[in-house]
Image: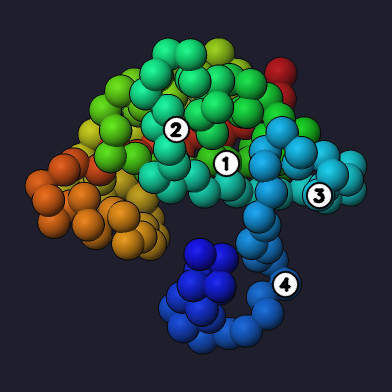
Amino acid sequence: MLGLSKRNIEKSYNFTNPENLFLIRANVEQISNVFDSSDLVERIYINFCNPWPKKKHNKKRLTHTRQLNLYKSFLIPEGEVYFKTDSDELFEASLEYFKESGFEIITKTYDLHKENVFEENIETEHEKMFSEEGIKIKALIAKFNIR
């Protein structure tokens, strides 16, 4: 999937080896092994992640409060998280997770393609597939505010 992502980015933006973009395959709990204190990220994209619908697995969600607090260790002040999902339940829970973690939700939609609230939405394969099935895409942009 990372290879496909790299090729799509190169094709879409007509460049190779961008200096401001990194595709990383790592478990979020081990992110401190990938980043050090000098590595800072402006934006994180979480697209169509596993919704972990069973309550006992909720802490594995990439938008769970536990994970969002980890992201703060490498997000710049005012850094953003872009999140898209087809899951109503995950989206509703994520709204609470972002608030609990001190993120400000600056944009949200329950129908991304109708409202088109992302300035430059890059449609993923999952997004296209779900949309063609008539499933509405839920999305939000949250900003990390240091208090």
**Residue at far right of view:** 37
Contact, mark 2 vs mark 1 (Cβ under 8 Å): yes
Q: Which residue was labeled with disc 3?
A: 34
- Marked residue nearer the N-terminal end (3 or 1): 3
Q: Can you tell which mark lies on residue 106? A: 2
Q: What residue did someone put label 4 on?
A: 19
Disc 3, disc 1: CB below 8 Å?
no
Q: Earlier in the sequence, mark 3 or mark 2?
A: 3
Distance of label 3 from label 1 (alpha carbons): 19 Å
Q: Secondary structure at mark 3?
A: loop
| Badge 4 vs badge 2, beta-carbon distance below 8 Å | no
Q: Name the kind of residue labelled 1 in the image.
A: Glu
Q: Which residue is mark 1?
A: 80
Q: Is there CB contact under 8 Å for labels 3 and 4? A: no
Crowd around label 4: few <14 · some 14–19 · many ≥20 (10 Å): few
Image location (x, y in percent) of residue 96: 45, 16
